[in-house]
Structures are given as structure tokens and as C-alpha cells.
């Protein structure tokens, strides 16, 4: 009995040490979280054709294309995407921007380029031709190589006349990234009930104020 009484404090000390060690291990154990439910941007489809918009002009009407007319405007680029929308090869167009500061649409104060969009140039219910039947359009405003810091907002601003929305997507897996929108109301981009369309857009009343 005396031996047990002598051993008991030692046992308690050992148990305390074990509990303390367990608590420390629990404290440093890495915490994992299931992020599978967090929305992720889809991977860009691999382009088969590349177009570069070099002007803020809205020329192009309903039929002119960058492959047939110069300079390459955004309207002509989208007309080309629409024109080849039913091709059996299912083209994937990447539309980039490289507009110089000498362009009349350059806003030097805000370091952005403003594309004034005339909805009368389109006979459709949106300011531009519909596109994306086979999910083959990437319009990327972040490709404009110069301008304000992209953390402050987009460098490419589309300014409508409050008559129509801007884009009508007719299929899935289209990417619209880094464009600012003004004057298109609440229906600036129509996205169909198909998978994998991704739009990173900005709307504003002024070129230097935008909400994502």
C-alpha cells in the first residue's frame, strides 16, 4: 500500500505530461478545409485563332470582320466570331487589346480607353452581334498592355447609349474578362442557361468608379 501511495504522484505527473503533449499537438495540427464548394473560374479554352483590337472605333456594322477590314475594332472582331460560329472546326477566338495612347478614345486622366458603342450599328437586340454558339470566345480586357493598374479597375471601358445591352452569349464556355461597362442598363451581358460561362465585369457611372 505504501508503494502505491509513493507511485501515485508519479502516475499523475505522467498523465499530466501526456495530456499537455496532446494539447500541444492538437494546437499545431494543420487545419484542412473543403474548398470544393467555392466557385472557381473555368480554365480558358485553348484558342485556335487570335484577334487584337487596336482602336476604340466602333466601325464594322453587322458584317465587316477583322479578317476582311482594317483596323480591327471590337465590333469587327465579334462579327468574325459570329460569322464563323457554325464552322465545323468550332473555332476558339481569343480577342486581345493593344490600343495606343494616341487613340482618340484614350482618357489620359484615368489611363483608360473608352469605346463609345453605337447600338444603331447592330440590328439585333444587343449592341453587338450574338456569339458563342459553340463556346468559342475569350474577350480579355486585361491584355491591354499599358494603362492604369488593373488593381484599380479595367483599362478598357465600353460606353453604351442606354438603348441596348452589350453582349448576347448564345452558348457555353465563353470568357469575358476585365471590361468596364457604362450605359447598358441592367442587361449588359445575357448569359444562357449553359455551363462554364465566366464573366469578370465592372460597371460604373464614371471611368474611375467601378464595382465588380
Image: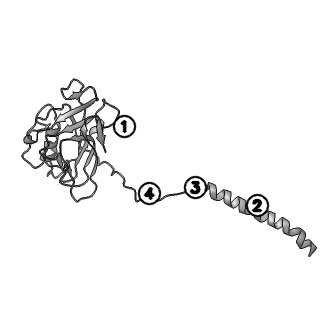
Residue 206 falls in which quadrant of the image? top left
Task: Please name the residue that numbered disc 1 is placed on.
Answer: 151
Where's residue 104, x and y in %? 18, 26
Element carrying mark 1: loop
Q: Which residue is drawn at 72% across and 63% down?
A: 19
Task: Please name the residue that numbered disc 2 is placed on.
Answer: 17
Circle nearer the viewer, 4 or 2: 2
Q: Residue at x 8, y 39 (%)?
A: 61
* Depicted 209 relative to depicted 89: above or below: above
Of the numbered discs 4 and 3, the one sitting upstream in the chain is 3
Element carrying mark 3: loop
Where's residue 66, x and y in %? 14, 36
Task: Please name the residue that numbered disc 4 is placed on.
Answer: 35
The answer to the question of whether label 4 and label 3 lie on touching residues, with beta carbons closer than 8 A, is: no
Of the numbered discs 4 and 2, the one sitting upstream in the chain is 2
How many dots with numbers? Answer: 4
Circle nearer the viewer, 3 or 2: 2
Q: How crowded is mark 4: few (under 14 residues within 10 Å), some or many (20 or more)?
A: few
Q: From the viewer's perspective, tell me whether residue 190 is left or right of residue 144.
A: left
Q: Distance between the residues labelled 4 and 1?
A: 25 Å
Q: Residues within 10 Å of mark 3 (few under 14, many from 20)?
A: few
The answer to the question of whether label 4 and label 1 lie on touching residues, with beta carbons closer than 8 A, is: no
Task: Please name the residue that numbered disc 3 is placed on.
Answer: 30
* Depicted 115 relative to depicted 9: above or below: above
Amino acid at each position: 500500500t505504501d508503494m502505491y501511495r509513493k507511485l501515485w504522484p508519479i502516475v499523475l505527473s505522467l498523465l499530466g505530461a501526456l495530456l499537455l503533449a496532446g494539447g500541444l499537438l492538437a494546437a499545431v495540427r494543420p487545419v484542412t478545409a473543403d474548398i470544393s464548394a467555392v466557385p472557381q473560374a473555368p480554365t480558358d479554352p485553348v484558342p485556335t485563332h487570335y484577334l487584337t483590337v487596336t482602336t476604340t472605333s466602333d466601325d464594322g456594322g453587322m458584317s465587316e470582320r477583322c479578317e476582311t477590314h482594317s483596323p480591327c475594332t471590337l465590333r469587327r472582331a465579334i462579327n468574325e466570331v459570329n460569322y464563323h460560329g457554325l464552322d465545323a472546326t468550332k473555332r476558339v477566338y481569343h480577342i486581345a487589346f493593344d490600343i495606343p495612347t494616341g487613340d482618340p478614345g484614350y482618357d489620359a486622366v484615368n489611363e483608360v480607353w473608352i469605346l463609345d458603342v453605337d447600338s444603331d450599328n447592330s440590328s439585333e437586340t444587343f449592341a453587338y452581334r450574338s456569339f458563342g454558339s459553340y463556346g468559342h470566345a475569350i474577350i480579355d480586357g486585361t491584355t491591354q498592355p499599358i494603362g492604369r493598374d488593373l488593381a484599380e479597375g479595367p483599362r478598357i471601358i465600353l460606353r453604351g447609349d442606354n438603348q441596348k445591352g452589350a453582349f448576347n452569349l448564345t452558348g457555353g464556355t465563353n470568357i469575358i474578362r476585365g471590361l468596364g461597362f457604362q450605359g447598358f442598363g441592367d442587361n449588359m451581358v445575357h448569359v444562357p442557361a449553359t455551363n462554364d460561362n465566366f464573366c469578370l465585369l465592372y460597371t460604373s457611372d464614371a471611368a474611375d468608379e467601378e464595382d465588380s
